[in-house]
Amino acid sequence: MDNNEIKQLITELSLEHKDIDDAINLMKEQAFIDELQIRRLKKRKLKLKDEIQQLESKLIPDIEA
């Protein structure tokens, strides 16, 4: 996977992360709050954040000692 593909994937995952965040915020504003669904979304959001960080670390060149 080259750097351009990694950057594209980071962009897609970041967008999904933001969409989930927006969905959670909207759900919290509703009269009926589905705590289970919010918990699932938060887990997915955290997993996306971890994936994004792993991909970003691949973009950092290795430093030779």
Image (spheres, rainbow, N blue to C red):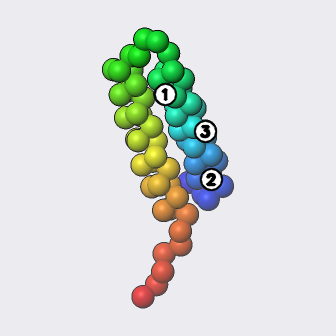
Q: Residue at x 42, y 49 (%)?
A: 50
Crowding near the residue tagged with mark 2, few <14, some 14–19, many ≥20 C-alpha atoms within 10 Å = some
Percent x, y for residue 31? Answer: 46, 12
Percent x, y for residue 1? Answer: 56, 54
Residue furthest toward the top?
32
Q: Residue at x 58, y 53 (%)?
A: 6
Q: Which residue is mark 2?
A: 7
Percent x, y for residue 19? Answer: 58, 32
Q: Looking at the picture, which amino acid does disc 2 mark?
A: Lys
Q: Looking at the picture, which amino acid does disc 3 mark?
A: Leu
Say which label, 3 or 1, has the lower sequence index.
Answer: 3
Q: Which residue is mark 3?
A: 15
Above/below status of 8 relative to 24: below
- Determine whether the residue tagged by mark 3 lies in a helix, strand or loop: helix
Q: Looking at the picture, which amino acid does disc 1 mark?
A: Ile
- Determine whether the residue tagged by mark 2 lies in a helix, strand or loop: helix
Disc 2 vs disc 1: which is toward the camera?
Answer: 1
Q: Is residue 9 visible?
A: no
Quarter of the image for residue 15 reads top right
Disc 3 vs disc 1: which is toward the camera?
Answer: 1
Separation of marks 3 and 1 at Cα, in angstroms: 14 Å
Q: Which residue is mark 1?
A: 24
Quarter of the picture holding the C terminus: bottom left
Crowding near the residue tagged with mark 1, few <14, some 14–19, many ≥20 C-alpha atoms within 10 Å = some
Q: Residue at x 61, y 59 (%)?
A: 3
Q: Nearer the viewer, residue 54 or 35?
A: 35
Disc 2 vs disc 3: which is toward the camera?
Answer: 3
Above/below status of 2 relative to 19: below
Q: Nearer the viewer, residue 49 or 31?
A: 31
